[in-house]
Image: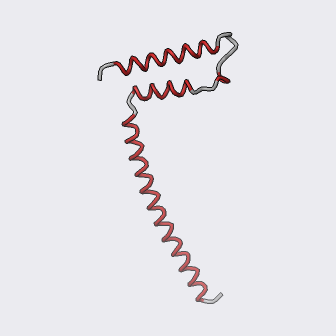
Amino acid sequence: MSEDSYEEIIRQINEAHMELKIRLEQVSRLRIDCAKLQLELLKLFKPQCLEILEVIRDISVPADFIDLNNGDGIESRDNQVCSKKYRVFVLNMGPR
């Protein structure tokens, strides 16, 4: 290989190295922005909101996951959902 081809390879390597540094800086900034947004999001989740999210998650559980061996699986699921809805209602009616 000639001296010119080695210099060209070194130039390409240096160019790629600089591009990687720029990308790393961009990724670092995005990670910082993401962490800030996550903290802002956590500030929005008050205990009442978390309780509501839990109820929504429980309500959206497919019927396949209900234990039907006790004979009244659907009824017990309905009782659980109603109980949780009542707790959410009470939490929302509490002092503000």
Residue closest to the eye, 81 or 38: 81
Q: Residue furthest left?
A: 96
State the residue in front, 46 or 14. 46
Based on the displayed image, in which of its 4 quarters is residue 2 positioned?
bottom right
Q: Quadrant of the C terminus?
A: top left
Q: Name which residue lies at 67% across and 10% down.
A: 70
Q: Which residue is farthest top?
A: 71
Tell me: 3 left or right of 29: right
Q: To which quarter of the image does residue 10 belong?
A: bottom right
Position of residue 53 measured from the top left corner of the image (x, y, whole percent)? 48, 29
15 on left or right of 93: right
Colour scheme employed for the rendering of this structure: secondary structure
Whole-percent x, y for residue 3 in the image: 59, 89
Q: Residue at x 51, y 75 (%)?
A: 15
Total labels drawn: 0
Residue 94 coordinates in the image, percent (x, y): 33, 19
Residue that lies at the very extreme toward the right in this rendered image = 69
Quarter of the image for the N terminus: give it.
bottom right
- Residue at the spot x=43%, y=20% of the render? 88
Q: Which percent across, then down, holds residue 79?
A: 55, 13
Looking at the image, which residue is at 42% across and 29% down? 49
